[in-house]
Image (cartoon, rainbow, N blue to C red):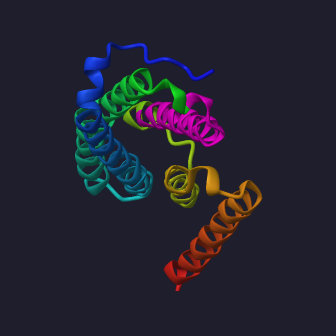
Amino acid sequence: MELEPVLPDYFENFYGYIKSLHLIFVVTWFAALFYIPRLFVYQIEAHDKPEPNKTILLDQLKIMSRRLWFIIGWPSAILATTFAILLLLIRPYYLEQGWMHVKLAFVLALIIYHIKTNSILKELDKNVVKWTSNGMRLYNEGATLVLFAVVFLVILKSALNWIYGVIGLFALAVILMILFKIYKRYRKA
């Protein structure tokens, strides 16, 4: 038995528009998730600078981080999620498909990543530095892994061989780690 739409049939007429808005806000959400850890790296490194550069840099980077997060990051996350819920209310039968369960698990991981990023922002605003710049560079790859996983899941759907998908995700993680180590060596040279 297929799940029935929760919203009136009238909303089916707007499905394409809602999906477009969902994708736009997913893109802007990921833009914030990709850029803010980079700003965090700069903040962490600014703590090692001599005064007055340290204070000048930290003040500016904190302003940039807060603006990015509260003007782009949070609104995009909320709107992307809201439009996704609307899409599922219009076509709930997607919830019966295995690929959607896996996608929603990755979305949950992304939301947890977002909330953790928010807590890092609050710590750095108080000049509490718990991360190294290299650790933050590595943390920055979390959103990349989720993006790859979700895009492949959505495009390939049921054609996806789950074993190859998981192996591919781990391979991507290994490649990112290798590139990170190469970058670290290059930076020291």
**Residue closer to the observer: 129 or 163:** 163
Residue lying farthest to the front in this orientation = 1
Q: Out of 46 and 112, give the one closest to the viewer.
A: 112
Q: Is residue 108 magenta?
A: yes
On the image, the x and y values in percent for residue 20 come to 26, 42
In percent of width and height, residue 170 lies at 70, 62
What residue is rendered at 38% in x and 29% in y?
Answer: 87
At 46% from the left edge and 33% from the top edge, which residue is drawn?
123
Q: Taking 158 as reference, is 144 left or right?
A: left
* Numbered disc total: 0
Q: Residue 13: image x %, image y %?
A: 24, 29
- 175 or 165, nearer to the observer: 165
* Residue drawn 54% across the image and 80% down it: 188
Which image quarter holds the N terminus? top right
Q: Which residues are magenta?
A: 95-121
Residue 18, given in percent of the width and then of the height, sits at 27, 33
Farthest residue in the right direction?
163
Outermost residue to the bottom: 189
Left or right of residue 178, residue 125 in this image: left
Q: Left or right of 9: which side holds 102? A: right
Residue 5 is covered by the magenta coloring: no
Residue at left offset 53%, top offset 28%? 93
The kind of secondary structure the magenta stretch mainly shows is helix
Asked if residue 67 is positioned above or below residue 92 in the image, the reply reads below
Q: State the residue in front, 66 or 111.
A: 111
Up-down: is 85 above or below 24? above
